[in-house]
Image (cartoon, rainbow, N blue to C red):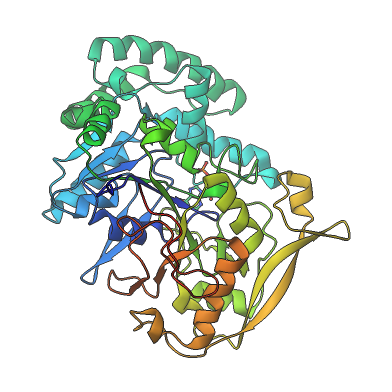
């Protein structure tokens, strides 16, 4: 059978989000004809650095930075039109065309009451709060499930919208006033505001599943980009400290409206250490000088909220879990350079739980909360890796560290990132076009075991 020249690839976060997916998807977007964002909303934030210029994107796929790449915001996302328009304005002000952006007509719309509910419910929860981004994400998805949501297609039809919003806002006002003691919203003011957003977004709103299918049929190369990360997945993450959508690879099919048979590869992105924003258990968290050093060197502050991220050692238990629930073909390891100054580096290889060694992620919040890490310690390299562009350039200890991670997770590493800019990258093997599994294995070989048939 002849080799298929291109592949459809899902890129997911293998930890708690902020793994550097923005940089990886930006790099891979160069080879993609279409980039599809399939879940989440403006809770996400991608930072991409191109020619020294920093781009912060929340909803628009980073493929927008390439002139010929079509970009899709899929059905599984939730859209805050005000913030999306601000993002469009920012991108256009840099002379980047947004004409090739398509928005799913079935994506749900974040309304003012969603943001109000998100903040008010976090306040009400007090010490039990989730630590959300406050962008109304959870309440928008809750309305989707409750079947009281407003979709992009509703926003496009003024008369229907007026009727639907009048009813919905009157209903939501009861909750705002009676439950949260907040002032009610004036339906007409919200309707007018959202009708203006509709006018601006109308040219972009289409049946995106159909567009994606067209690209699949003409054998174009599609990159599905996840937001957040595996451990923030609503079904498979550290519930209840999760987001309200499905960042895992399976979420790409639902959120884009494609079948699983169209997907060729799944790439996981993980930092060389671990971070987490918001509340919830984090076994390898370091509340010490090393945690501070990682935070400083890694500029670990949220793109969306500016919140300081919690930092910890690499956790291979959650890594193995991410390999399993996403079916990862390979990994991109980011921010290796952040570890450059360390004398020694710990890696969590298993957990201790109730006096027993546990190799698997305990998908049970009470058990996960009392899991403590079992570490192995590796020597640091105490040398800058920022200028390394090939595996051969890396200090031997850094290479050993990467091999150790690959061995622990039983998955090859395809890409290593040693800095924020595009060129600060070691491409071990092109994960889209290269033969499947011709990548860095734990033993350092690049054995080809499978190729795309
Ligand atoms: P929400 O998505 O705003 O509801 O927040 C739920 C949880 O997901 C909180 O712990 C947030 O900090 C976390 N979260 C949401 N989006 C991101 C992200 O893009 N990166 C990292 N954490 C996120």
Please count the marks in the image.
0
**Residue 298 horizontal/vertical position (percent):** 46, 72
**298 and 113: which one is in front?**
298
Q: Locate residue 270 relative to residue 163 in the image: left or right.
A: right
> In front here: 302 or 371?
371
User: Observer-nearest residue: 372 or 86?
Assistant: 372
Residue at image position (18%, 54%) is 66
The answer to whether residue 380 is left or right of residue 83 is right
Residue 188 higher or lower than 2, as above or below = above
Residue drawn at x 73%, y 63% as measured from the top left: 350
- The picture quadrant where one finds residue 379 is bottom right
In the current view of this chain or complex, which residue is farthest to the right?
355
Residue 309, picture quadrant: bottom right
The answer to whether residue 300 is left or right of residue 90 is right
Residue displayed at 47% across by 88% down: 395
Q: What x and y, as percent, mark residue 374? A: 75, 68
The answer to whether one can see residue 297 in this image is no
**Image quarter hosting the N terminus:** top left
Answer above or below: position of 9 versus 235. Answer: below
Please identify the quarter of the rendering in which residue 165 is found: top left
Where is residue 44 drawn, in percent x and y? 42, 48
Tell me if residue 433 can be seen. yes
Q: In the figure, is residue 406 to the left or right of 199? A: right
Residue nearest the viewer, comparing 288 with 162: 288
Q: Tell me residue 383's x, y (percent).
A: 46, 90
Q: Residue at x 58, y 43 (%)?
A: 242
């Amino acid at each position: 059978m002849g080799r298929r020249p291109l592949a459809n690839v899902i890129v997911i976060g293998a930890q708690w989000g902020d793994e550097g997916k923005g940089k990886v998807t930006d790099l891979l977007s160069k080879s993609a004809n279409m980039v599809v964002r399939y879940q989440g909303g403006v809770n996400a934030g991608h930072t991409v650095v191109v020619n020294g210029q920093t781009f912060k994107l929340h909803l628009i796929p980073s493929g927008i930075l390439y002139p010929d790449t079509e970009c899709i915001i899929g059905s599984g996302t939730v859209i805050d039109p005000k913030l999306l328009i601000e993002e469009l304005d920012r991108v256009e002000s840099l002379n980047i065309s947004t004409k090739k952006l398509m928005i799913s007509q079935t994506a749900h719309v974040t309304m003012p009451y969603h943001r109000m509910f998100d903040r008010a419910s976090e306040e009400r929860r007090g010490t039990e709060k989730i630590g959300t981004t406050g962008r109304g994400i959870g309440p928008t998805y809750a309305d989707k499930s409750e079947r009281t949501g407003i979709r992009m297609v509703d926003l496009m039809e003024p008369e229907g919208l007026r009727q639907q919003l009048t009813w919905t806002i009157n209903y939501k006002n009861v909750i705002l006033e009676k439950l949260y003691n907040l002032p009610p919203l004036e339906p007409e003011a919200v309707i007018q505001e959202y009708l203006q957003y509709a006018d601006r977004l109308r040219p972009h709103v289409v049946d995106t599943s159909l567009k994606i299918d067209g690209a699949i049929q003409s054998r174009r190369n599609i990159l599905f980009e996840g937001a957040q990360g595996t451990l923030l997945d609503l079904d498979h993450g550290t519930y209840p400290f999760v987001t309200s959508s499905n960042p895992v690879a399976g979420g790409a099919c639902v959120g884009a409206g494609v079948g699983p048979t169209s997907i060729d590869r799944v790439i996981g992105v993980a930092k060389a250490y671990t971070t987490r924003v918001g509340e919830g258990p984090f076994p390898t968290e370091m509340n010490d000088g090393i945690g501070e050093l990682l935070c400083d060197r890694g500029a670990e502050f949220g793109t969306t909220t500016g919140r300081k991220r919690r930092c910890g050692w690499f956790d291979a238990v959650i890594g193995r879990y991410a390999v399993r629930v996403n079916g990862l073909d390979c990994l991109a390891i980011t921010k290796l350079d952040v570890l450059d100054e360390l004398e020694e580096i710990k890696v969590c290889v298993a957990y201790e739980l109730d006096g027993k060694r546990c190799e698997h992620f305990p998908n049970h919040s009470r058990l996960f909360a009392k899991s403590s890490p079992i570490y192995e310690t590796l020597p640091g390299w105490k040398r800058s890796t920022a200028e390394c562009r090939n595996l051969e350039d890396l200090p031997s200890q850094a290479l050993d560290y990467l091999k150790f991670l690959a061995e622990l997770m039983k998955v090859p590493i395809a890409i290593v990132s040693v800095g924020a800019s595009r060129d600060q990258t070691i491409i071990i093997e092109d994960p889209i076009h290269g033969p499947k599994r011709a990548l860095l294995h734990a033993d350092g070989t690049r054995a080809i075991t499978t190729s795309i048939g």
